[in-house]
Image (tube, rainbow, N blue to C red):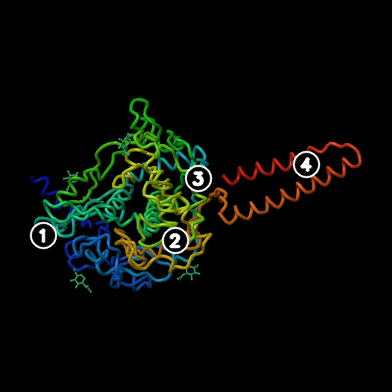
Amino acid sequence: MLRCALLLLATCALLASAQFPRECVTPEGLRSGRCCPTPAGLENDPCGATAGRGLCVPVAVDARPHGPQYPHDGRDDRERWPVRFFNSTCRCNGNFSGFNCGRCRHGFTGDNCDQRVSVVRRNVMQLSADEKLAFVSALDQAKRTVHPDLVIAMRRFQEIFGPDGNTMQFENITIYNYFVWSHYYSVSKTFLGAGQASFGGVDFSHEGPGFLTWHRFHLLQLEQDMQDMLQDPSFALPYWDFAIGGSTCDICTDDLMGARSSFDMNSLSTNSVFSSWRVICESVEDYDTLGTICNSTESSPIRRNPAGNVNRPMVQRLPEPQDVAACLQVNTFDTAPYYSTSDESFRNSVEGYSAPQGNYDPAVRSLHNLAHLFLNGTGGQTHLSPNDPIFVLLHTYTDAIFDEWLRRHSPDSAVYPDENAPIGHNRGYNMVPFWPPVTNAEMFVTAQDNLGYSYAAEWPAQPFTVTEIITMTIVAALVVVAVVFAATTCAVRAKSRREGHQPLLVDQYQRYDDDKSQSVV
Ligand SMILES: *[C@@H]1O[C@H](CO)[C@@H](O)[C@H](O)[C@H]1NC(C)=O
Ligand SMILES: *[C@@H]1O[C@H](CO)[C@@H](O)[C@H](O)[C@H]1NC(C)=O
Ligand SMILES: *[C@@H]1O[C@H](CO)[C@@H](O)[C@H](O)[C@H]1NC(C)=O
Ligand SMILES: *[C@@H]1O[C@H](CO)[C@@H](O)[C@H](O)[C@H]1NC(C)=O
Ligand SMILES: *[C@@H]1O[C@H](CO)[C@@H](O)[C@H](O)[C@H]1NC(C)=O
C-alpha cells in the first residue's frame, strides 16, 4: 500500500499526460489547458518565442459538422480534439516544428532547419542481410526504449487527476508501445457510463478519408522517434509489398518478421526476437465496462497464422498485383458518405471495403483489409494490430499506394472533404490522439516534396479500362478484316500465278489475337 502510494507520488512528481509531453501533464499544466514548453537549451522561453522559433497560441479545432455515425455529443474526450486536455499549443515559425518548436519539420534539418533531407523507404525483401538485421534490431530496441517525450493517459479526462485530484493518471510507455497505444486510442469505443454498453460506432482512424492521412502521420512519428533513438537521421521504415497473391507470407521468416513456430501454428518461431514480444491493449472488456484506457502493461505473445483462417477462404490469399493497379485508377479520392460504404472511392478501395476497381460490395475485403485479415491473429484485430510488427510494413505499403495516387492524380486539397465525414475525418480535424495538433489536411500532400520521404517502388501495369478494351476490340476487328482481305487477295493472286506456301500469315493473325485476350484478362 505504502509502496503503491510512493509510486503514485513519484509518477505524479514526474508529471506524465494522454500521449502528451511529460512536462505538460502536471496538475497545474492540465488545469491551465496550456502546453507550451521551452525547447531544450533555452531558459523559460515557451515555444522558443524569444529565439524566434514559435509562439504559444490557442488550439484551432474543426467546427464543421461531422457525419451521422456518431450521435453523441460531449461524451467522448476525442471530440474537438485536443481541447478536452489542452487549448494552447506551440505554433512554430517557418521550418521549425515539434511540441516546443525545438525541432525541424519533416524533411528539414540543420540548426536553422533550412537544409532539406529526405529518406527512401524500400522494399523490405530487397534489403541486404545486414540491413534486415539492423531493421529488426531497431524495432526491438523501440519496443524496449521509453519514449523520451510522451506519456500516455490511463484514464478518461474525467478521472485524469486521480482519486485525490492531484495524482495524474499518466505513465511512461516505450516508443513502440506508444505506436500501438495511439492506434488503440483512436479506435476505442465511447464509454457511456457504468452498466451501459460502450458505443462502438466511432473510429477516428478507419472507415473514412482520414484512414490514409492518419496512418501516414502514425508512421512518420514512429520513423522520427526511431531516427532519434538510433541517432540516425537516414533511418527509413521499409515496406512489405503484400500484393503478391498466393497464400505464402514471404516476410514471415526469422530474419524478418518471424517464421511460424514448429510447435504451435498460431505462434512465432523462438528464433525470432518477436516471439518474446508481449502485446498491450488486450483487455478491451475492462476498458469498455470500467471506462478505463489501455495502459503500458504487456500481456500475451503475438499470435499469427498466415492464410490460416479456414472458416473464411476469401482471406486465405493475399491481394493480387492487379488489385493495386486497379485502385490507383479510381479517380475520386473519396465519395459521400465518406465511410466504409463509399462507392467509387479510392480511399475505400485501398482501405479494402470495396472492390479494388472501386465498386462497393459489402462482402469484399481487399487490399489493406485483406492483408490484415490474412494474418489471422493479433495483426487482424483492429484494436491490437500494431502489436504485430508486420503492421508497420503493411501500412508503409498502403501509404506508398496513397502517395502514388497523389502523384498520379495531383488532386486539389479541396478533394479531401471538409465536412460531413465521420467524426475525426474532416479535413480540418486534428487527428486523434496526436500532439501537437496536426490536421488530416497536413498529410494530404505528396511525401517527397512535403514530408521528406519517398518510396523506391515499382507499380504493377494498369489493367485496361472499358473504353480501352472497346477501342482495342474495334482496332483488332479492323486489323482482322484487313489481314483477311490481304490474305485472300494474296492467296488468290498466288494461286492465279503458281502454287505457293503462305501459312505464315494465318499464324501471325492467330498469335496476335491470343496475346490480346491474355493481356485483357
Ligand atoms: C519516465 O521516463 C523518464 C524518461 O526516461 C524518466 O526520467 C522517469 O523516471 C520515468 N518515470 C517513471 C515513473 O518511471
Ligand atoms: C482553456 O482551458 C482552460 C482549462 O480548461 C480554461 O480555464 C480556459 O478558459 C480555456 N481557454 C479558452 C480560450 O478556451
Ligand atoms: C524552409 O527551408 C527552405 C530551404 O532552406 C526554405 O527555402 C524555405 O523558405 C523554408 N520555409 C519556411 C517556411 O521558412
Ligand atoms: C493497466 O491495465 C491492466 C490490464 O487491463 C489492468 O489490470 C491494470 O489495472 C491497469 N493499470 C492501471 C494503473 O490502471
Ligand atoms: C483465425 O482463423 C480461425 C479459424 O478459421 C478463426 O476461427 C479465428 O476467428 C481467426 N482469428 C482471427 C483473429 O482472425
Quadrant in which the N terminus is drawn: top left
- Let me know if residue 31 appears in the view: yes
Q: Which residue is mark 1?
A: 165
Q: Quadrant of residue 266 in the image?
A: top left
| x then y, percent, for residue 170 | 20, 54
Q: Which residue is mark 2?
A: 333
| x then y, percent, for residue 325 | 52, 50
Q: Which residue is mark 4?
A: 505
Element under label 1?
loop
| x then y, percent, for residue 496 | 89, 42
Task: State the separation of the CA atoms marked 4 and 1.
Answer: 90 Å
Q: Mark 3 and mark 4 in contact? Answer it, CB < 8 Å.
A: no
Task: State the separation of the CA atoms marked 1 and 3.
Answer: 50 Å
Density class for disc 2 (Cα within 10 Å; few <14, some 14-19, many ≥20) is many
Upstream in the sequence, badge 2 or badge 1?
A: 1
Looking at the rendered image, the disc whose residue lies closer to the viewer, 4 or 2, is: 4
Task: State the separation of the CA atoms marked 2 and 1.
Answer: 46 Å
Task: State the separation of the CA atoms marked 3 and 2.
Answer: 25 Å
